Image: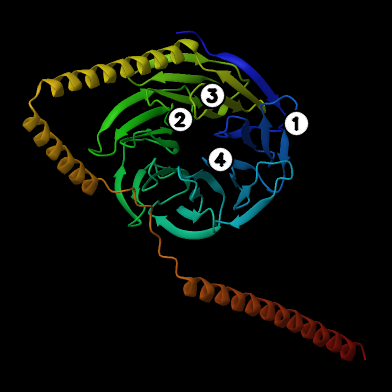
Amino acid sequence: MEQPQLKRTFRGHKKTVTALAFNPNMKQLASGSEDGAVMVWNFKPSIRAFRFTGHTARVHDVSFAPNGKVLASGSKDKTIRLWEPKVNGKCHVIKAHSSSVRSVQISSDSQFLLSGSDDKSVKIWSVPKRRFCCSLLGHANWVRTASFDPSALCVVSGGDDKLVKLWDVSRQICTDTLYDHDDTVTTSGFHPNGTSVATGSVDRSIKVWDTRSKKLLQHYDAHEGTVRRIMFHSSGNYMLSSGDDAKIKVWDLREGHILYTMEAHKGSVNATAFSPNGEQFASGGKDSVVMVWKWSESESKENVVSKKKKKKMTKRVVTKKKEMEKSKPLEEKKKSNNTTVETMKKEKKKIAPPVPPKFQNNEKITTALGYIVGQLDLITQTMNRLEERMSANEKRVLDMQKHFQSA
C-alpha cells in the first residue's frame, strides 16, 4: 500500500495544536490550540479560515455534531462553547465544570454532548436545549478522555487514576472497570460496530478490549512516548494514532501490525483525526501546523472491489432464490409465503427502534438549585460588606486611640 500523501497545510495557530475534527460535510476542518483559539479551516481556497476567540485559556478538545451545524470546544477555562461554524461564529457558553474541561464529544444523533474534566466527573448535556442531563461519577482523579459508543447508550472514560471505565448512560452507572494500563489514560474511542473499545496511555501502549467479554483483544507497544490521540477508521479495519515521539501511525487491526509510520511534524503530534468518509486524515502538533493527508488510493480501491463483490454475491443469491421458487409447486409457494409473512411479523416485533438515553430532567429541582445559588451569592455579598465595615470600624478605633495617646 502506498504512503499517504500530504494534501494541504494550514498555518494560523500561535501555539501547540491540541485537537482536530472534520465537519461531516467534508468542507471544513476544526482545530483547537493552546493559544485559546478555535480555527475552522475551509477546504475551498476562496473562503478564508474562521478564527473563533472566546476561551480565556487553552482549548483541549473540539467535536463537530454529525449534522454539521454545531461545533463544540472544551477548555482549561472550565467552559464548553457551542459554535456555529460560520463567519459570525455565534456561540453559547456552558459553565460546565469546576475545573479544566479535557474532553468533548457530540453523539451520533447530534442530541447529546459528553464532557470529561479535571473535577473527576463525566457529564452529559442536551445539545438542542443547552441543558445539563446527568453526571457519571466514579473516577478518583482527573478525567482525560470520554467517548460515546455509536448508539450513545454507552460511554468509555479514562484518566489519571489509570482506569478505563465503561458506563451505562440510561442507568447512569459504571458497568465495568478495566485495570490493564500502568499510567494515565489519555485517549479513548469506540469501534464503529460498538463491540470493542481502544485506549491510549502515558505508558506508551494502545489496548483494544471486547466490551462484551471485557477481554483484552490487542496490545500494541505503540509509541516511544505518551500516546496522545487514537481514532478508528470508519470501516473499522484501521486505527490512527499519534504521540510525543513526533510520529503518526496507521494500524491494520485485521493483521495486527503497522501500515504506515510518518514523521512530518516538529515535536509531539497531539491531535489526529480521520475524516467521516475515511478518505483523509488530519494531524496537528507542537509546531502549530495542521496537515491534511490523502488516504491511500489502494485502500479506496479495496473498498470499491469489496462493495462490488458484495453486490455480485447478493445478485447471485437473489437469482438462485427465484429459480428455486419457480421449481416449487403452487402449494409450497403459498406455505412459504405465509411463513415468510409470519417470520417478518415476528422480526418486526423483535426489532425495536433504538431508544435514546432517558434523563430525568426535573425543572423544579433546577429552578430550586438556581434560587439557592442566588441566595448564596447574596449572603457572600453581605458578608463581604460586613467585613469591610468591621475593618473600617477597627481603623477608626485605632485612630481614636492614637489621638487620645498623643493628647
* Labels 2 and 1: the sequence-earlier one: 1
Q: Which residue is mark 2?
A: 231
Name the foreground residue: 27 vs 227: 27
The residues tagged by marks 2 and 3 sit, at their Cα atoms, a distance apart of 10 Å
Name the residue at 62% across, 22% down: 291
Residue 237: where, in percent of width, then height?
37, 22
Element on which disc 3 rests? strand
Query: Which amino acid, by three-letter code, is at mark 2?
Result: Met
Element on which disc 1 rests? loop
Q: Which mark is residue 281?
A: 3
Residue 341: where, in percent of width, then height?
18, 41
Q: Which mark is residue 64?
A: 4
Residue 333: where, in percent of width, then height?
11, 31
Name the foreground residue: 305 vs 157: 305
Foreground mark, 3 or 1? Answer: 1
Q: Which mark is residue 48?
A: 1
The residues tagged by marks 1 and 4 sit, at their Cα atoms, a distance apart of 19 Å
Name the foreground residue: 307 vs 6: 307
